[in-house]
Amino acid sequence: MLIEKYDLQVLTPPCDPGAERFAAKARLVVDIREVLPYLNATLRGAVYFPDAGAEYSAPALTWKKAGHNVAFHPYEIAVSNAVDRDSAQKELDGLIALVNRTWERHAEITPSFEVRRRPTLMEVYKLLPQTNCKQCGQPTCFTFALKLTASQTRIEDCPPLFESQYADRLAALQAIVIDAPAIE
Ligand code: SF4
């Protein structure tokens, strides 16, 4: 097992003192940087930041999971939006199990060093039908674009996009949008 123990740190986000949601960190005693390309290969919606080669730079991988922003660093895993200490610990336990599982089967996985970027809001919005039909459950296409950009909804939630007249837009969106991750 790669990660056997960690120190839990739960804190109020520095940008939001007094908030009712918390950020949490698992401080690790092992370096997990070698796992990051394997997580990049297997986690939908992950964004990989390779080691830039500068003296103080280090690789990192970010991921959105069911309303949480997750960041994997060489000696740390951070998660946002925890309701309390217990839920923070549960989330981090799940993420550590994910890292351990990925490392245990890394010989079967082709690592990915691909650096993806999230599309901008306007790049996404311009490719939507822009009819504000509300079939997606959102009040406007702009709101849908906001959620799609943040990986909080999926392309499939916009039925009109699958009409033949929007085939080109659909293909373009599928090429740039990082899907909402599956909830584990
Ligand atoms: S279903 Fe598609 S076209 Fe209709 S409002 Fe939502 S994003 Fe716009």
Image (tube, rainbow, N blue to C red):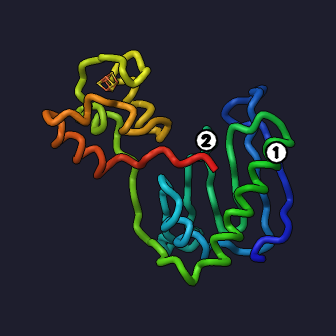
Q: Is residue 95 left or right of residue 57?
A: right
Of the residues tagged 2 and 1, which is closer to the observer? 2
Query: Along the line of sight, which residue is nearer the eye, 102 or 143?
Result: 102
Q: Is residue 103 left or right of residue 179?
A: right
Residue at x-position 83% and y-position 50%: 9
Q: Which residue is mark 2?
A: 66
x, y (%) of residue 47? 48, 57
x, y (%) of residue 155? 36, 39
Residue at x-position 36% and y-position 17%: 134
Q: Is residue 162 left or right of residue 33?
A: left
Number of numbered callouts drawn: 2
x, y (%) of residue 148? 41, 36
Residue at x-position 39% and y-position 27%: 144
Amino acid type for the residue under numbered disc 2? Ala
Residue at x-position 37% and y-position 38%: 156
Determine the quadrant in which ligand 1 lies. Answer: top left
Residue 10 disc label: 1
